[in-house]
Amino acid sequence: MPENSAGTLVTPAKPAKEKPGGTLYRGREGMWSWVLHRITGVAIFFFLLVHILDTALVRVSPEAYNAVIGTYQTPIMGLGEVALVGAIVFHAFNGLRIILVDFWSWATRNQKVLFYIVVALWLITMLAFTPRHLINVFSH
Amino acid sequence: MSTATLEARSTEAAVQSFTVTFLIRRFDPDVDTEPRWQDFDVEMYATDRVLDALHKIKWEQDGSLTFRRSCAHGICGSDAMRINGRNRLACKTLIKDLDISKPIYVEAIKGLPLEKDLIVDMEPFFASFRDVQPFLVSNSAPEPGKERVQSVAERARFDDTTKCILCAACTSSCPVFWTDGQYFGPAAIVNAHRFIFDSRDDNAQTRLDILNDTEGVWRCRTTFNCTDACPRGIEVTKAIAEVKQAVMRGKP
């Protein structure tokens, strides 16, 4: 970004073309918590879609169901489950934060503190879950 | 007398000036098809404002630079723009509060049609403002020869939202408004709040009905960009939350 540092009076003014679309809006905690909430929400929706489809396979035939579930027993899917749990845990805690922000004026005023509490709770939950889960994934 | 002159000269020399680079997003509808970034170097003091830099550029370097400003003291609400990626009033943003080791990015506010350089079409913004009936509606006449009486507590209820100067910094910082221009936006809701919670007003229910719409208060996703952007320090998101609760209760 600092291609044109302060004090370059001598260089001819050439239009900087690198960002014709405008700068990214620099929001704070509130905006980024909303962005994360939206991304995790859409991700969880697509997981649920696939999850309903693969569970519905048991109505087609138990063998087909077992075959599909069997393909999930890979380390890559194990890591995907860490991401899934991470998304759900953030979406859950931040959802509680949004309810508080909407209904409690103290929370509206202190939403940044609440966001960091959400991040802390997310970290604690993930620190407890991830090692236990990865041991299961990689020991089988 | 000679000492006085000397002292004056030494204090003058003590005030240090800096060369500050401004990257301004220009757009001339007669020439450009796309907005373009142009850089300007300006000599500035730490106590100068971004508006002073725009003036220096317009008066000394490039007279075609176009922007709005009227009072230049944070009251008229003309010069809201995006400075280093955040909505600010140019007349209230001091150089000493910015990192001048990097260029300072200045561009028009987002979400409203760009007309020229830093000027956008404010009509959609004022249309939503008009839609919430931002004026006192009273069904009763005051006592002859008297004003409408209001207690200190009743006045304090909506004091925060009376400060709005309609600069559009909040509405054009709202991610919902960028993608959905039909959304009333924070400024219109703030001005509805100012009359919904006014004890002298009798038309709160109409305004609550107007805002109880898919494009009304329920579009708010509490990103708090509006509260951060407001140059008057209005707690915009809190005002919107209060209107949401009034809609649910069915009364202010």
Image (spheres, rainbow, N blue to C red):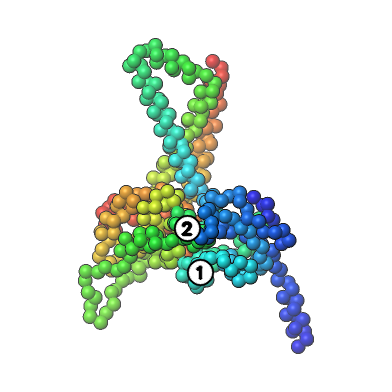
Q: Going by the image, does B50 lie left or right of A8? A: left
- Mark 2 and mark 1 lie on one chain; the one further toward the N terminus is 1
Report the front residue among B93 and B56.
Answer: B56
Quadrant assignment for the N terminus of chain B: bottom right
Q: Is residue A67 above or below residue B168?
A: above
Is B18 situated above or below B249? below
Give the farthest residue toward the front.
B31
- Which residue lies at the image location 42% right of the left edge and 54% below the top edge? B237
State the residue position of label 2.
B114
Farthest top residue? A63
Question: Crowdedness of circle 1 by 10 Å Cα count: few (<14), some, many (20+)?
Answer: some
- Residue ID at (66%, 62%): B41
Q: Amino acid at mark 1?
A: Arg
Question: Given this view, does label 2 or label 1 mark the residue nearer the observer?
Answer: 2
Left or right of A129: which side holds A8? right
Residue B90 occupies quadrant: bottom right
- Which residue in the structure is indicated by mark 1? B69
Residue at 37% across, 21% down: A55
**Across the whole image, how many numbered discs are drawn on residues?**
2
Give the percent coordinates (x, y) of residue A30.
48, 48
Q: Residues within 10 Å of mark 2 (few under 14, many from 20)?
A: some
Q: Is residue B3 visible?
A: yes
Please, which chain is the residue tagged with disc 1 on? B
Q: Is residue A26 visible?
A: no
User: Horizontal placement of B200 versus B97: left or right?
Assistant: left
Task: Determine the CA span between mark 2 and mark 1.
Answer: 16 Å
SS for dot 2: strand
Q: Position of residue B140 (x, y in %)?
A: 21, 71
Q: Residue at 69%, 65% (x, y): give it.
A: B18
Instruction: Tell which of B65 and A54 is nearer to you.
Output: B65
Q: Say what amino acid the circle numbered 2 marks.
A: Leu
